[in-house]
Amino acid sequence: MISDELLEKLNEQMNFEFYSAQSYLALAAYCASESWDGFSNWFIRQAEEETEHGMKIFRFINAVGKRAIITGMESPNNEIRSVLGAFEAAYAHEQEVTRRIYAISDIALADHEHATYQFLKWFIDEQVEEESTVDSIVQRLRRIGNDGNALFILDAELGKRGTTAAAL
Ligand code: FEO
């Protein structure tokens, strides 16, 4: 039986995942405006994933007989001024997501809510991958610095990211 507190936190996380999608779209928009179409593609794909993360929680809340509440969202950060800044913001965002997932997991464990904890384990694993992926891109961008050719190569590489069932 899910407690009111746990339900509230799940609902909050669902909305935060939708906010994550908006945040990634804002980063995609910056990159697109600078004609970094590969980086923009990467962020658009990430936004798609975040929407699906939110929908996973939406479906879980319904599956346990509760009602998901869709709340409004604050505006994402539209002030990014560099590709490196965009990925650094993405990394900080993923760290925040991880903190939130851990906090909800702590409540589920304290409540002995095994079904919810089992559900959250997917997100725990996903966060390891997401933080690692974004951190790797940040490290590469830092090494690249002002090397335009290397930046073009990375842009082309990230432009190949597609939507995969595994990613969702
Ligand atoms: Fe759904 Fe990137 O966390």
Image (cartoon, helix red, strand yellow):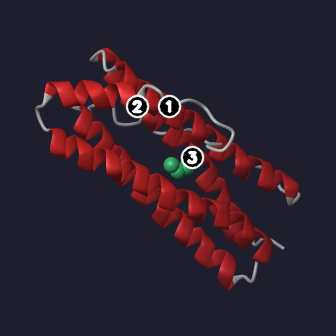
Q: Bin the neighbour count of mark 2 within 10 Å (Cα to Cα): few under 14, some 14-19, many 20 and up.
A: some
- Front residue of this view, candidates 105 and 3: 105
Q: Position of residue 111 (x, y in %)?
A: 72, 82
Q: Amino acid at mark 2?
A: Leu
Disc 3 is placed on an element classified as helix
Q: Amino acid at mark 3?
A: Glu
- On screen, residue 157 above or below 90: above
* First-in-chain label (3 vs 2): 3
> Could you give the CA–CA distance between mark 2 and mark 1, rounded to whole angstroms?
6 Å
Disc 2 is placed on an element classified as helix
- Residue matched to label 2: 158
Q: Amino acid at mark 1?
A: Arg
Q: Position of residue 168 (x, y in %)?
A: 65, 42
- Residue matched to label 3: 17
Circles 2 and 1, Cβ within 8 Å, touching? The answer is: yes
Q: Residue at x 54, y 71 (%)?
A: 103
- Mark drawn on residue 161: 1
Residue 38 sits in which quadrant? top left
